[in-house]
Image: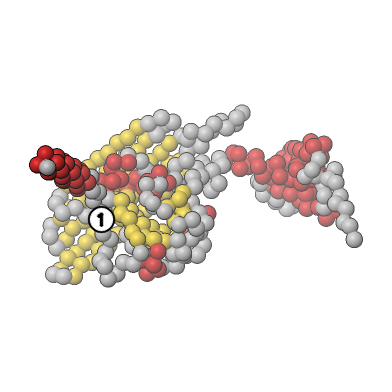
Amino acid sequence: MSINIKVLNSFAFLALFSLSAYAEMEMNTVETVTIVGSQEDVAGSATVLSNEDLAKMVDTDIHKILSAVPGVYVRTEDGYGLRPNISIRRTAPERSGKITLMEDGVLIAPAPYTSASAYYFPTTGRIHAVEVLKGPAAITQGPSTIGGAINMISTPIPEANGGFVTQELGSDGLSRTHVTYGVNNGALSGLVEMHENSVDGFDSIMNMGGDTGFDKSDFLAKLRYTSGVHELTFKMLDIDEMSNQTYVGLTQASFVTALRALPAIVIGGLDSLVGAVVGSLIVGLTQGYIAYYQISIENSIGISFGSGFSLLAPYLIMFVILIVRPDGLFGKEEVERV
């Protein structure tokens, strides 16, 4: 009987030791949770990507950064995150139209109902932190918060005088320069920041050549005056962007090619291969004829059609043909059954 008691005591000691070791292991693997706001003013869920988190990612593409946030879905367009398509909780991602985008708590555009991200989005390379609000917490941030809200926090004014310089070089002519310097003299403090990012692009255009990248420059200045519990901050931001890609990821050259191909397809007929060939010949001859004789015609009638009239002329022909033959020259006419 005593032997059995000793055995049971041994098993109990081993089980207790295993539980304590497991509990200790669990305590060592608990992740740090950042609380946004307070219990009174935040409802729903929120995620904060701190400056340390962004530094670990080593990426300036907002699509790749937000892919680490649960419930956030992204759809890339140009490969660099210039014009993001962001979805929170499975809302429509087109132009991030179902979420509110902010920088330092301010809407990124004065017209939030007009696809603001289609023409401006903060440069991720100079962003200090990112806040993602989901659920009821986002309703206080403004309109278009069906999915949620994303607030990008710019570089703060430092607590002590200082700054840093970052220079990155990469393939496809990639160059990124980030310079900041701030001063803090108590009541009056300020920050100056410059961010330059350029790349030739990774796309290749067959038989056309040319760059498919972008050149984007940001200049930011902050000035803060503090008096007791009151604080006044002035912020100025100037952005200059030269992009060789359209909003759908096409290059400027390929976009013009698509514009030239559309009249040819419609003129010949959408369902006819022969019509596509004939339509292409009509468009090509029309553009060549207009480009060669346009100056003579303008001088004879005394009217200027403009430098881009050769691109417009095929559309005029397409309009006339659609009136006469809605299905195109060689398109099959649909049979309506009564």
Residue 36 quadrant: bottom left
Q: Nearer the viewer, residue 203 or 39?
A: 39
In which quadrant of the rendered image does the N terminus lie?
Answer: top left
* Residue 249 picture location, percent across and down: 54, 43
What residue sits right under mark 1 in the picture?
A: 34
Q: Residue at x 29, y 41 (%)?
A: 56
Tell whether 151 sits left or right of 145. left
- The structure's colour scheme is secondary structure
Q: Nearer the viewer, residue 81 or 205?
A: 81
* Residue 238 picture location, percent across and down: 37, 53
* Residue 25 picture location, percent across and down: 20, 43
Tell whether 116 sits left or right of 177. right
Q: Residue at x 35, y 41 (%)?
A: 59
Look at the picture and state if 171 lies above or below 242.
above
Q: Residue at x 14, y 51 (%)?
A: 160
* Residue 136 picture location, percent across and down: 39, 67
In which quadrant of the rendered image does the C terminus lie?
Answer: bottom right
**Crowd tier of the residue under label 1, counting other residues whose Cα lies within 10 Å: few below 14, some 14–19, many 20 or above:** few
* Residue 141 at least partly seen: no
> Disc 1 on helix, strand or loop?
loop
Q: Residue at x 55, y 40 (%)?
A: 251
Tell whether 294 sits left or right of 192. right
* Residue 29 at least partly seen: yes
Q: Nearer the viewer, residue 80 or 320?
A: 80
Residue 33 quadrant: bottom left
